[in-house]
Image (tube, rainbow, N blue to C red):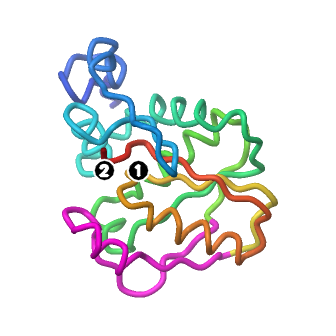
Amino acid sequence: MLLPARCPLCRRPGPAPCAACARRLEPARAGPYPAVLAYTGEARRLVQALKYRNGRAVAPALGAAMARLVVAHAVDEVTWAPTSGSRRRARGYDQAQVLARAVAGHLGVPCRPLLRRRGPSRAQTGRRRADRLADAPVFTATRRPRARVLVVDDVVTTGATLHAASRALLAGGAKEVRAVAAAATP
């Protein structure tokens, strides 16, 4: 049985987010990595619905908006900064992968798993900036990337995760790496 999609913010049936709620979302400010939303208020609730409450219905809208941020820059493939295996198993999915597939679909390029998270990884949520930077995740390329890669993540705070992912892709053979996130902390 298929259930109709609901807006994760107001719970009305229909698109996720609905038009009324989408108008209340604050756009992200310019930063080192482009992002669609400022990770505050309603936008924070929207991303947390995707991340913690299986709110994958928001991925098409977020993916389209993320794709619009990078459409001027040609990419050959899309990948994501993978979450840890334990968080992926607990949630049943990797929210960055869900977003990456949506972005790739809008850009018309393949989405491939190009990165593996190495070693133990502490959740970045709720940690101070200095701790995030000192304990950034470590990634390795799992296969040779194409020339121009776009790496996707859900939330960018310090940029440590996207920087580590980009570094691994370049070391794996990518000629150019761009990054985009659904939200950025102000």
Residues 17 and 179: in front is: 179
Residue 145 horizontal side relative to residue 127, left or right: right
Which residue is drawn at the image coordinates 38% and 72% (left, top)? 84
Compared across the picture, whether 169 is left or right of 74 comes to left
Looking at numbered disc 1 in the image, what kind of residue is underneath it?
A: Asp
Instruction: Tell me residue 152's x, y (percent).
Output: 53, 52
Residue extent of the magenta highlight: 114-142
Q: Is residue 71 magenta?
A: no
Q: Is residue 75 above or below residue 148?
A: above
Query: Which mark is on residue 40?
Result: none
Height in image: 168 above or below 159?
below
> Where in the figure is residue 147, as x and y percent of width and height?
81, 59
Tell me: residue 170, above or below residue 50.
Answer: below
Q: Quadrant of residue 142?
A: bottom right
Instruction: Pick whichever, 142 or 175, lies toward us.
Output: 175
Is residue 67 shown left or right of residue 144?
left
SS assignment at label 2: helix
The percent position of residue 23, horizontal first and vertical second, equals 32, 16
Q: Residue at x 37, y 73 (%)?
A: 133
Q: Nearer the viewer, residue 61 or 68?
A: 68
Label 2 sits on residue: 51
Q: Is residue 119 magenta?
A: yes
Mark 2: few/some/many CA within 10 Å (<14, 14-19, 20+): some
CB under 8 Å between discs 2 and 1: yes
* Mark 1 residue crowding within 10 angstroms, few (<14) / some (14–19) / many (20+): many
Which is closer to the viewer, label 2 or label 1? 1
Q: Which residue is mark 1?
A: 154
